[in-house]
Amino acid sequence: MNNKTQIRRALLLLGFLGLAFAGLSYRLVDLQVLRHDELSAKAEHNTQHEYWQAPRRGDILDVNGNILATSVPVKTICADPSLIGTFQPLVARAIAPLLQLNENDLAQKLTPRLARNAKGEIVTNNLHYVRLAKNISDDTWRQIVTAMTNLNFGVDEKKLPRAQKEFVRNLRQHAIFTEPDQMRVYPNGSLASQVIGFPAAEEEKISGRLVSQIVGRDGVELAMNKQLGGVAGWKVTETDRAQHELVALRDEDVHPRDGLNVVLTVDSVVQHIVETALADALQKHTPRSITGIVMRPKTGEILAMASLPNYDPNQPNTITPETRNRVLTDVVEPGSTFKIVVVSGALNNGIVNLNTPVFCENGAFAFAGRVLHDHERLGNETVKSVITKSSNIGAAKIGIQLGADNLYSYAWNYGFGQRTGIPLPGEARGFLYPVKDWSKVSIAQIPMGHGVAVTRLQMLYAMAAIANHGVLMRPMIVKQLQERDGSVVQRYAPESVRKIISDKAVADMIEALKTVPTKDGTAPDAAMKNYVVAGKTGTAQKAENGAYASGKYISSFIGFFPADDPQICISVVMDEPKEGYYGGKVCGPVFRDIAERCASYLNIPPDPSRMTNNPSALVVENGSRKL
């Protein structure tokens, strides 16, 4: 071989090496410079992960600190189908019974499938993450781990090649995994369910994974959702090829801020008393619904609020439109309970006093082309006995004397036609039409509780104002917010809205209302043994399709005690009761049952005038002195 040939070959080799190094250099420049940002982002996507950390939802407590709603830790079971290979039937057979899932359906979930994304590109769907089941207990998870550990592949695993041994190990240890979650629990079942409300799980896709969070859907759960929900945290960290976190490379770690506990004014014992009494009445009178409220008139604090039928928030299938909180959502004509508005207004304006005579037309009164009726033939009465005997005609005549503008003003000041402001969702305004929209007969009908529509809470709200020296107090349902350790973040103070009537008018109204639960009044069955009760009955014919429905009534009794130093105010309302429908007859005994049990529980001192060792406790009836 001559020198020229050797030189040529050397040059060719050198040229080849030069081209190779040039290509390598170009590739390095392309990777390190031209595509640096793109490839760096891909690498970060493959190794860096962002994890959303859910806060613990706060508890809902009653006024004494008893838990009404809480969150308990549970697990969400997930799978990585890429680690399962072709063993979906085997895995499904092992864990489907533990998850209470169909074996074939579970096997389908564990199988990666091809799909097209929004760009039309074919991608593998659910390759590394699929959710299998929620709200799984620690005990069930331990059983799943055992089942996965004991998977039998039907071969001698000791003889498998190293790669297959690694596959089996990853399948057993990493193919099925968990994510921390929480479940809302209501320890007392249906107790105060419409006040507490119920939750729902909302899902959001974060870092390619569905993240679940609890949100309120009704009641306090909805009204105080932001305070209960807390603030989410997150961490940004890097992982190795096996998806294990490299703690030293963790970039961000922001801990979640747990939600606040919401302490209600509701007393779970009083709530139980009310719901038990309502349940008994529901069985006896079979109304479409029945409601009860207990309020402290001096502060506006709601001690109990119930509507039957109700639901168990632990069982979402029991929640229907029929189980709504009718105390807030339903509006009805109040009937005779509304007479407290017109009579107190007339007393306050000095138009009448308790002894002012009112002729009740012997039960039929023609006015503005209509004939108004009483439930009995009443003749010459007083303003006081108009309340005692609940005369529609008497109330209409007092309303005519008061005048349309004054009547509307008092009704508005008592809170009708507007929301009370209680921090619960779904509250209706009711209907109180302006005077310009009244008919000629409205001035006589509205004092009877017709031609106006109210919520159960509004009517109690108005009665409680009379019990509180004529001062309207905003209804309270939330007492305070606190941290999990019990430290108070915010307290809610009682809020007075306005003074409606004078102290003299209040005293006169209470004297009149005391006569209702007596043998001469419309609610003798509401009388208590050791307390003087002041209250008012209501029996309103239901309006349907623009007309009054025959035989259908809204029956009610609203009262407070002790009458001269009111501690609690109670409302009981039935919708279409059977076995009687007069408010005093069907609702009066329910009021008395609730009132007597509450008086005992709350240690309300007996009324001095009812003490058996007090001479003033003797009552003169028919010329004889009786206890």
Image (cartoon, rainbow, N blue to C red):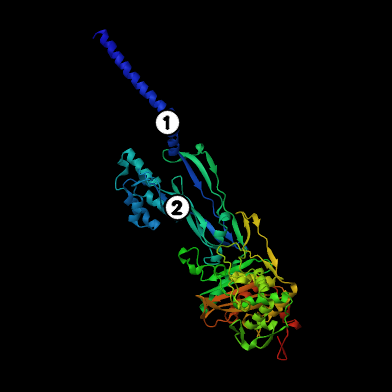
| Mark 2 lies on residue | 76
Q: Nearer the viewer, mark 1 or mark 2?
A: 1
Instruction: Report whether residue 296 is seen.
Output: no
Q: Nearer the viewer, residue 464 or 331?
A: 331
Question: Distance between the Cα atoms at labels 1 and 2?
Answer: 39 Å
Task: Specify the amino acid type for callout 1.
Answer: Arg
Figure check: 423 above or below 24: below
Q: Which x, y percent locates residue 357?
A: 71, 85
Q: Is residue 328 above or below residue 371?
A: above
Q: What x and y, as percent, mark residue 118? A: 38, 45
Q: What label does residue 515 carry, if any?
A: none
Q: Would you identify the image quadrant in which residue 222 lies?
A: bottom right
> Mark 2 falls on what kind of element?
strand
Q: Residue 170 appears in which quarter of the rendering? A: top left
Percent x, y for residue 55? 54, 51
Q: Nearer the viewer, residue 66 or 375?
A: 375
**In this orientation, does residue 363 appear?**
yes
Q: For mark 1, does the 10 Å Cα neighbourhood hold few (<14), some (14 to 19), or many (20 or more) residues?
A: few
| Residue located beneath label 1 in the image | 35
Instruction: Name the residue type under label 2.
Output: Thr
> How many badges with numbers are in the image?
2
Q: Residue at x 55, y 46 (%)?
A: 255
For disc 2, the neighbor class at 10 Å (few under 14, some 14 to 19, many from 20) is some
Rendered residue at 55%/81% (across/down): 581
- The outermost residue toward the bottom is 623
